[in-house]
Image (tube, rainbow, N blue to C red):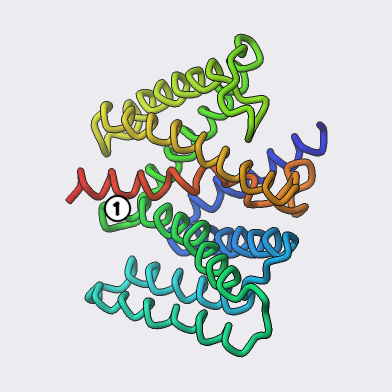
Amino acid sequence: MKTRAITGFIFVLVMLASLLSGAYIFVVFYGLLSLLCLTEFFSLVKSSGINPDKRLGLLLGFILLCSFVTRLFVDYDSKWLLLNILLFLAIFIRELYKKSKLPFSNIAYTFFGLLYTVIPFVCFISVAFISGAYNFHMALGFFLMLWTNDTGAYLFGVKFGKHRLFERHSPKKSWEGFFGGIFTAVLTGYLLSVFYTDYAYYHWMAMALIISCLGTLGDLTESMFKRSIDIKDSGKILPGHGGVLDRFDGLLLSAPAIFVYLYLITN
């Protein structure tokens, strides 16, 4: 427990420092986290007997990140992003030269790894630039709502939890904890609207609801994936916490939804 607390405290400090240190450090830090998540994902899949192309996947993930992130700093026609589609043909071509009994499983998991880990982080990074210039308010607010959802769900679940939410995938989660997490996240959203007036209070509260629901579903999705291959943690890089993928499972489904929400109300 002590190791877990120390690791969590240090990691939160590093994350907050990256948010407050300017656009370049923010982008590099969360870009690296994305590639770490992708690395863990490929390692987990490989342990199940499927062999995604890890090196090519990481290269394509890096190119994908760079192409979208560059768009945040350099004004160029977004149609050039379509070139990424051509790059992904390399996954099929590369598999032709490998001797594998499950070539399309390898291809599918290489694709899915990029979709599951890189795209959500691209969306999260883009959230901080949704108004054009870098603004840490949205990124910080995102994490505060996600963290208070997790904390509220845990506390309400311990105190009142009786009805299982998804026992097959996560036996400890309860409906009481789920609604408790929504309550604390929405309350946090309202409080954020008092300090950060970028958006009206109802937008902050709506985003909190989205983050709470999809953050929980993201957690359950990763649990389902790990149970399917009989693995407890995605990695060991964070003592007491497991892997990076374990810490950011709530972001993977909620970040794309928040990006879409903000894009629709901003543009």
Q: Hey, which residue is sitting farthest top in the picture?
A: 160
- Badge 1 crowding class, 10 Å Cα cut-off, few under 14, some 14 to 19, many 20 or more, is some
Left or right of residue 199, residue 120 in this image: right
Left or right of residue 240, residue 214 in this image: left
Vertical order, 109 against 242 (above or below) = below
Across and down, in percent, residue 182 comes to: 45, 23
Q: Quarter of the image holding residue 177?
A: top right
Vertical order, 188 against 128 (above or below) = above
Q: Nearer the viewer, residue 83 or 151?
A: 83
Vertical order, 99 against 51 (above or below) = below
Residue appearing at x 75%, y 47% in the figure: 230
Pointer 1: what residue?
Answer: 130
Across and down, in percent, residue 167 comes to: 63, 27
Vertical order, 28 against 261 (above or below) = below
Q: Secondary structure at mark 1?
A: loop
Q: Nearer the viewer, residue 230 or 257?
A: 230
Q: Looking at the picture, which amino acid does disc 1 mark?
A: Ile
Residue appearing at x 61%, y 25% in the figure: 173
User: Total label count?
Assistant: 1
